[in-house]
Image (cartoon, helix red, strand yellow):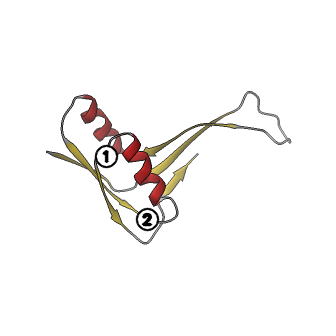
Amino acid sequence: MIYTLTLNPALDITIATNVINKDSINKTKLRSVSAGGKGFNTSRGLNCLKTGNTAIAFCGGLFSDDMKKLLEEEKIRSRLIPIKNSIRVNI
């Protein structure tokens, strides 16, 4: 069993737009939301290689439930350690 560690996990949100207008409101579309962090990426790679692993991360705040759900959807076995502070959000 391999354990990966993500010390600073993030919720990665990818958006897209067709055009960017200066001094105007620019409309975007949501492309994807994923669990971000080096340990999670390593666990993804190990899953592709069919190698047993568990991703360990410190996770708290408003988006901790979202992070847990995203990892479950990707079938990444995880152990999220609850913390008081919120995880990062990258857009």
Q: Is residue 39 above or below residue 85?
A: above
Q: Residue at x 76, y 29 (%)?
A: 19
Q: In the visual, does 9 lie left or right of 55?
A: right
Seen from the viewer's position, the closer of residues 38 and 84 is 84
Q: Amino acid at mark 1?
A: Gly
Per the image, label 2 sits on a secondary structure element best described as loop
Q: Is residue 6 above or below residue 19?
A: below
Per the image, label 1 sits on a secondary structure element best described as helix
Q: Which quarter of the image is occupied by the N terminus?
A: top left
Q: Residue at x 40, y 53 (%)?
A: 68
The residue mark sitting in front, 2 or 1, is 2
The spot of residue 24 in percent (x, y) is 85, 41
Callout 1 environment at 10 Å: few (<14), some (14 to 19), or many (20+)?
A: many
Judged from this view, the residue extending furthest toward the right is 23
Q: Is residue 45 visible?
A: yes
Give the residue number, with chain letter if any, for mark 1.
Answer: 39
Sequence-earlier tag: 2 or 1:
1
Q: Residue at x 48, y 64 (%)?
A: 86
Q: How many marks?
A: 2
Give the residue number, with chain letter if any, for mark 2.
Answer: 60
Q: Residue at x 29, y 33 (%)?
A: 45
Q: Is residue 36 visible?
A: no
Q: Amino acid at mark 2?
A: Gly
The spot of residue 6 in percent (x, y) is 33, 52
Callout 2 environment at 10 Å: few (<14), some (14 to 19), or many (20+)?
A: some
Seen from the viewer's position, the closer of residues 36 and 32 is 32
Q: Is residue 90 above or below residue 20?
A: below
Query: Is there a contact, CB below 8 Å, between mark 2 and mark 1?
Result: no
